[in-house]
Image (cartoon, rainbow, N blue to C red):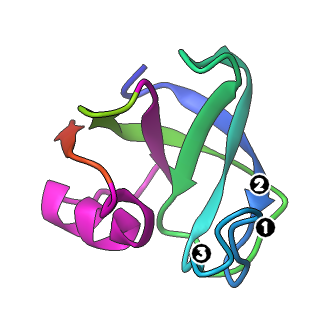
């Protein structure tokens, strides 16, 4: 999956808040990849990095997987084909939500 080109449907754009946890603010676009089933029985979740405006859909490259050690789901990290982020940069950008989990970043 790393290196694959995927399309993310954004259901939590930049500037929005989590539907259930109203104190979680989304500083990046977040959504799901239709057609890829995750272990939780839902479509695969994905963070979008390198896009600084709210979007409804985005096609880009999977550059990393955030493996939640203490949860059943992993999150994919997607960005424009010409972008790259270090593990530290990824963790910094997704910590608004991943701070609640024990994670490892696979690149």
Q: Are marks 1 and 2 in contact (CB under 8 Å)?
A: yes
Whether 62 is drawn above or below 11: the answer is above
Which residue is identified by label 2?
A: 10
Q: Earlier in the sequence, mark 1 or mark 2?
A: 2
Q: Nearer the viewer, residue 62 or 73?
A: 73
Residue 99 spot, x, y in % from top left: 30, 64
- The tag on residue 14 is none
Q: Earlier in the sequence, mark 3 or mark 1?
A: 3
Picture quadrant where residue 17 is located:
bottom right
Residue 13 spot, x, y in % from top left: 73, 70
Which residue is identified by label 1?
A: 55
What residue sits 59% from the left and 80% below the top? Answer: 25
Whether 39 is drawn above or below 51: the answer is above
Residue 34 spot, x, y in % from top left: 77, 26
Disc nearest the viewer among 1 and 2: 2
Looking at the rendered image, the quarter that the N terminus falls into is top left
Disc nearest the viewer among 3 and 2: 3
In the image, residue 95 lies in the stretch drawn in magenta: yes
Residue 27 spot, x, y in % from top left: 55, 80
Q: Secondary structure at mark 1?
A: loop
Distance, label 3 to label 2, CA atoms, is 11 Å
Q: Is residue 70 left or right of residue 74?
A: left
**Mark 2 crowd level (few <14, some 14–19, many ≥20, 10 Å Cα):** many
Which residue is identified by label 3?
A: 26
Q: Which residues are magenta?
A: 72-100
Q: Is residue 19 left or right of residue 101?
A: right
What residue sits 23% from the left and 32% below the top? Answer: 69
Q: Is residue 36 left or right of residue 47?
A: right
Distance, label 1 to label 2, CA atoms, is 7 Å
Distance, label 3 to label 1, CA atoms, is 13 Å
**Mark 1 crowd level (few <14, some 14–19, many ≥20, 10 Å Cα):** some
């Amino acid at each position: 999956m790393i290196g694959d080109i995927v399309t993310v449907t954004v259901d939590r754009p930049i500037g929005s808040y989590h539907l259930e946890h109203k104190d979680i603010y989304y500083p990046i676009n977040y959504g799901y990849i239709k057609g890829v089933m995750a272990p939780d029985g839902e479509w695969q979740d994905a963070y979008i990095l390198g896009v600084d405006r709210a979007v409804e859909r985005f096609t880009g490259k999977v550059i990393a997987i955030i493996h939640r050690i203490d949860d059943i789901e992993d999150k994919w990290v997607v960005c424009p084909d010409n972008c790259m982020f270090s593990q530290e940069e990824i963790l910094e950008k997704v910590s608004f939500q991943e701070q609640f989990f024990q994670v490892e970043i696979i690149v």
